Amino acid sequence: MGVVIGETAIVGDYCLIYQNVTLGGTGKQTGKRHPTLGRNVVVGTGAKVLGNINLGNDVRVGAGSIVLRDVPDDSTVVGVPGRIVSRTGHGCPLEHGHLPDPQAKVIRSLLDRIESLEQKLQNLSTQ
């Protein structure tokens, strides 16, 4: 219930689409305007896959992600916008509670760098 699949979307064999997923278009263009999912694709709860894009075979999309670009085979995509975080190959489980957060990693590294620079500035001002 709550799944939206656009009229030109193509869903491959053995795909698993959780609730509240949208396989939608991005405008009112004519022709093929919805996504194509390969075989064995898993699309997590609340994910949005938008536009005439291709998700390869054995792709995993994390819950709540918004995918706007093509995704190669054997990849895991998470985030807004969706980013590839793993290319581990067939059989990699999609554990929604343990997916990496690439933006949080960047923010953490920037905060660590700021703290380091502030410490150096503090040391220079006490000399």
Image (cartoon, grey):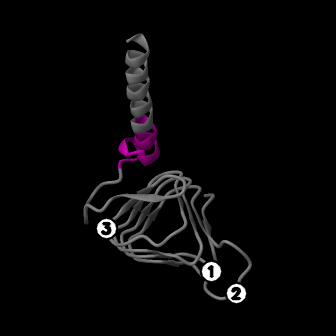
Where 88 falls versus 8 (above or below)? above
- Residue that badge 2 annotates: 30
Separation (CA) of disc 2 from disc 1? 7 Å
Q: Is residue 24 magenta?
A: no
In the image, 84 versus 1, the foreground residue is 84
User: Picture coordinates of residue 81 (x, y %)?
Assistant: 54, 57
Look at label 2 and name its amino acid. Answer: Thr
The magenta segment = 95-108
User: Picture coordinates of residue 93 (x, y %)?
Assistant: 30, 54
Determine contact: label 1, label 3, CB under 8 Å: no
Determine contact: label 2, label 1, CB under 8 Å: yes
In the image, 53 versus 39, the foreground residue is 53
Which quadrant holds the N terminus? bottom right
* Mark 2 / mark 3, whichever is N-terminal: 2
Look at label 1 and name its amino acid. Answer: Arg
In the image, farthest residue toward the right: 28
**Label 3, residues with CA under 10 Å away: few <14, some 14-19, many ≥20:** many
Q: What number is the disc on residue 74? A: 3
Indicate the secondary structure of the residue bearing disc 1: loop
Q: Residue at x 56, y 53 (%)?
A: 46
Separation (CA) of disc 1 from disc 3? 24 Å
Separation (CA) of disc 2 from disc 3? 30 Å
User: Picture coordinates of residue 39 (x, y %)?
Assistant: 37, 75
Secondary structure mostly seen in magenta is helix
In the image, farthest residue toward the top: 126
User: Picture coordinates of residue 82 (x, y %)?
Assistant: 49, 58
